[in-house]
């Protein structure tokens, strides 16, 4: 993380020297068209925002689909995008350990940060030979009757549950409405429609 902060500080110095040609482009990501800007780390959340925000937001995906978040090193442009956005959405857990360092280094404290693992029930990962098997479509609520052993970790793949997708989509829509209240009805209508689609998918 020292490396990341060092890259960030170096980039700020460069921007200070070449602000006309360099940082102006990063700033334009946020407000060039009057839309709010949303940055997400991984594709599932990018797709949720795309479904909920429609044409009311500029959305940036930091990690391309298929890339490994565990080995991600944010680029200077990634950090500037987070600094300048209205909403930053990430998963949380070990795969996003780099995020804490970035968030502590940015000066813009008005960014609405949404850690998706905080919006859904979590469950512990289980070994392949565990006696209690879960259906792949089962809700990811934690099993209260399970005695958690030292060394067990939460399953970070919270987006794979359709019920969790509904919960997170509702939370993201609320986040959009909180930073762009003039379009609240638009976001709320799209939330209702999208959650209805997810519910129909889950029943099928």
Image (tube, helix red, strand yellow):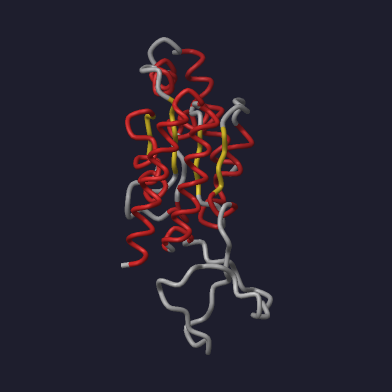
Q: In this view, does 23 lie above or below 134?
A: above
Q: Quadrant of residue 109?
A: top right
Give how far across and how far down residue 26 sits, in percent.
42, 22
Kindly identify the residue that appears in the image at 56 percent across and 47 percent down: 115
Residue at (38% x, 17% y) in the render: 32
198 over 78 or under it: above or below: below
Say which residue appears at 66% left-offset and 80% top-offset.
145
Quarter where residue 108 is shown: top right
Q: Where's the N terminus, which quadrant?
A: top right
Counting from the top left corner in percent of width and height, residue 155 is at 53, 66
Q: Judge from the rendering whether residue 200 lies leftward or rightward of residue 134; answer left or right.
A: left
State whether residue 202 is above or below residue 114.
Answer: below
Percent position (x, y) of residue 128?
Answer: 47, 83
Observer-nearest of 84 and 203: 203
Q: How many labels does the image show?
A: 0
Q: Is residue 41 above or below residue 153?
A: above
Q: Position of residue 176 (x, y in %)?
A: 48, 34
Q: Is residue 34 left or right of residue 79?
A: left
Q: Which residue is drawn at 55% across and 41% down?
A: 3
* Closer to us: 23 or 176: 176
Quarter that holds the C terminus:
bottom left
């Amino acid at each position: 993380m020292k490396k990341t902060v060092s890259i960030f500080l170096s980039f700020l110095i460069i921007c200070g020297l070449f602000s006309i040609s360099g940082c102006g482009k990063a700033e334009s990501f946020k407000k060039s068209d009057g839309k709010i800007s949303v940055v997400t780390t991984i594709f599932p959340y990018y797709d949720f925002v795309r479904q909920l925000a429609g044409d009311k937001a500029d959305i940036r995906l930091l990690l391309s689909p298929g890339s490994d978040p565990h080995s991600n090193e944010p680029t200077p442009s990634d950090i500037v995008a987070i600094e300048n956005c209205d909403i930053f959405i990430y998963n949380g857990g070990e795969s996003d350990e780099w995020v804490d360092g970035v968030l502590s280094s940015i000066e813009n404290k008005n960014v609405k940060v949404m850690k998706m693992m905080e919006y859904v029930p979590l469950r512990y990962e289980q070994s392949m030979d565990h006696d209690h098997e879960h259906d792949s479509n089962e809700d990811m609520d934690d099993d209260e009757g399970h005695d958690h052993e030292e060394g067990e970790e939460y399953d970070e793949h919270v987006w794979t549950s359709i019920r969790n997708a509904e919960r997170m989509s509702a939370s993201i829509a609320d986040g959009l409405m909180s930073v762009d209240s003039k379009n609240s009805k638009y976001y709320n209508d799209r939330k209702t429609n999208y959650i209805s689609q997810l519910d129909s998918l889950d029943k099928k």
